[in-house]
Amino acid sequence: MILRVTNLKKYFPVEQGVFSGAKGWVRAVDGISFAIGEGQTLGLVGESGCGKTTVGKSILRLIEPTEGDIVFDGVPVLSLQGERLRKLRRRMQIIFQDPISSLDPRMTIGATVGEPLRVHGIARGKELQEAVAGLLKKVGLPPESLNRYPHEFSGGQRQRIGIARALALQPKLLVCDEPVSALDVSIQAQIVNLLEEIQEEMNLSYLFISHDLRVVEHISDCVAVMYLGKIVEATGRDELYDNPLHPYTRALLSAVPEIGRPISQVRGKISGEVASAINPPSGCRFHPRCPHRMHICPLDEPPLGEVCPGHKAACWLYE
Amino acid sequence: MNQTITSSSLTTPVGRSLWYQAWRRLLRNKMAVAGGIVVIVITVLALAAPFICSYGYDETSPDQFRPPSLKHLMGTDIHGRDLLTRVLYGARLSLGIGLVATLVSLFIGVAYGAISGYAGDSTDNLMMRVVDIVYSLPYMFFVIVLVAVFGRSVLLLFIALGAVQWLTVARIVRGQVLSIKEKEFIQASRAIGAGHLRIIINHLLPNVMGPVVVYMTLTVPAVMLQEAFLSFLGLGVPPPSSSWGTLIADGASSINALRIYWWLLLFPGVAMALTLFSLNFLGDGLRDAIDPQLR
């Protein structure tokens, strides 16, 4: 396993005023565990606000988690400081959702893509130029892009630049934080294919965060479904899409629009809004919206247990 | 932009930076260009003053209170000194004070604001409360006390004016930094392993410089005006040096009921007004050019 996350929690304080302390906590991530094998892709799916991005950023220590354990390639990530943390970051990188704000508008593409190499003193001068040109070629950008600025590129191209920057340090794990959500559908496919090619070539592992079930189906080996800071279902890709167990997963899958399917056939519709993470519902967090609610659901939280081999779900229907 | 892409196969394309685009927009603004030209001309004249003036700025002569003539284009003052010479030398001092005080405030303010905004939390809170406190001091009073204690000197003027101006710069920079540091490219830099200093210098500062440059062009005239005010009160540049403020003060004091020496007030006044207008037009043009949405 290249990455193993155990019981990760991140609570954000809710503050009011300058002098009073925290009024409450937003439980953005509330005790989730998963693992990613070398060269594998784990898809992390959920609605917006369910804590997916917080998980991704916590792994890279862009956000300091409240609690939990992250082991990357045998190294406990959360105990690292200073120089050792910097070294670790060479092997873990992130691609962001927004291709506009993820690139420095005042820096040329060459400077942006070359920055990781300069920061770590890996290459300079002509060597740096060649390395950057190589990276641009790898992500399918013309070498002339070097002296251009981000605003001169389209969304898809900018996402390629972000990928080139992330690849510069030859990482082993790439956290892809909704890398295609901001792109047109036709461009999405290009970027996903590019990510797959690179994965094969460099034996990368991906944590692929997305709310788009079809993109996740395409790229993932395993999929974990998140709801309000918790993983509610986790299994292999084919198993999840063929045999979804959790009512939430079923609802998500049936919500994927499909050409030719009448709206009356949408199964497992759910209503209502996602509950607040400040004051989550008792017991199973999904129970206010669940079509299969039972008397136990509001009382006790279901564990994420194995329903059949290799398929975990947190639902009282299967206990 | 399309032209550069199609021609890219022939020549090595050089991207158009945001600064370049801002420059193009600035050139399209006629008032700003005119303002810029006037500022440049006055600056060149001021710098060349020792070479183009046929009199010394403190060179007295028996020709007192002469109205403008071919010999003295702007006339002479009470000591028979050539007013044109004194206006040009005054430009050196006035522009110089404006520029130096602004630069001083810029360095202090940018560093202070960037650190405060980047550090955030309690550090930010503490640093900004300090700014608030200094802000609330009646600064003219502060300057007057400084001058009273240490005597009149140009250096003191720099310090006094710069010490007040940096507060606003610090606030502007801090606000900008607060909004930019949440952008994902800053997080990307952290993920890469870049240190704090590198992030501040390479990513934050270039992105906050737009509003700072604008503020600077508007600060120069503000400082010049304050210098003039202090000189008018007799707290500014010590004689026999001339700044526009002292010249205007002298001009105003030599107007009396018997004889109106209008040229002593008019020429320094016009020079000052022209410069202030030009700088303000330039500043407005820069603001529109650097951030077109701000309009």
Image (cartoon, grey):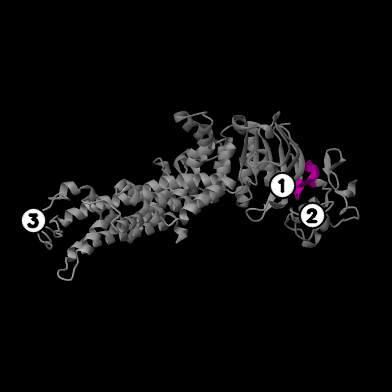
Identify the subunit bearing mark 2.
Answer: A
Mark 3 secondary-structure assignment: loop
Task: Give the residues drawn in magenta, as a range.
Answer: A225-241
Residue at screen point 23% across, 47% down? B47
SS for callout 2: helix
- At label 3, the amino acid type is Pro
Q: Amino acid at mark 2?
A: Ala
Per the image, label 1 sits on a secondary structure element best described as strand
Asked if the stretch drawn in magenta spans residue A81, the answer is no
| Residue matched to label 2 | A251
Label placed on residue B62: 3
Task: State which chain disc 3 sits on.
Answer: B
- Is residue B286 visible in this depiction of the protein? no
Q: Viewer-nearest of labels 2 and 1? A: 1
Lower position in the chain sequence, tag 2 or tag 1: 1
Q: Nearer the viewer, mark 1 or mark 3?
A: 3
Mark 2, Cα crowd under 10 Å, few <14 / some 14-19 / many 20+, is: some
> Gap between marks 3 and 2, in whole Å?
100 Å
Q: Distance of mark 1 from mark 3, alpha carbons? A: 84 Å
Q: CA distance from mark 2 to mark 1?
A: 27 Å
Amino acid carrying mark 1 in the image:
Tyr
* Residue A240 inside the magenta-drawn segment: yes
Most extreme residue toward the front, as rendered? B149
User: Residue A78 at x, y = what percent?
Assistant: 68, 35
Q: Tag count in the figure?
A: 3
User: Residue tagged by mark 1?
Assistant: A11
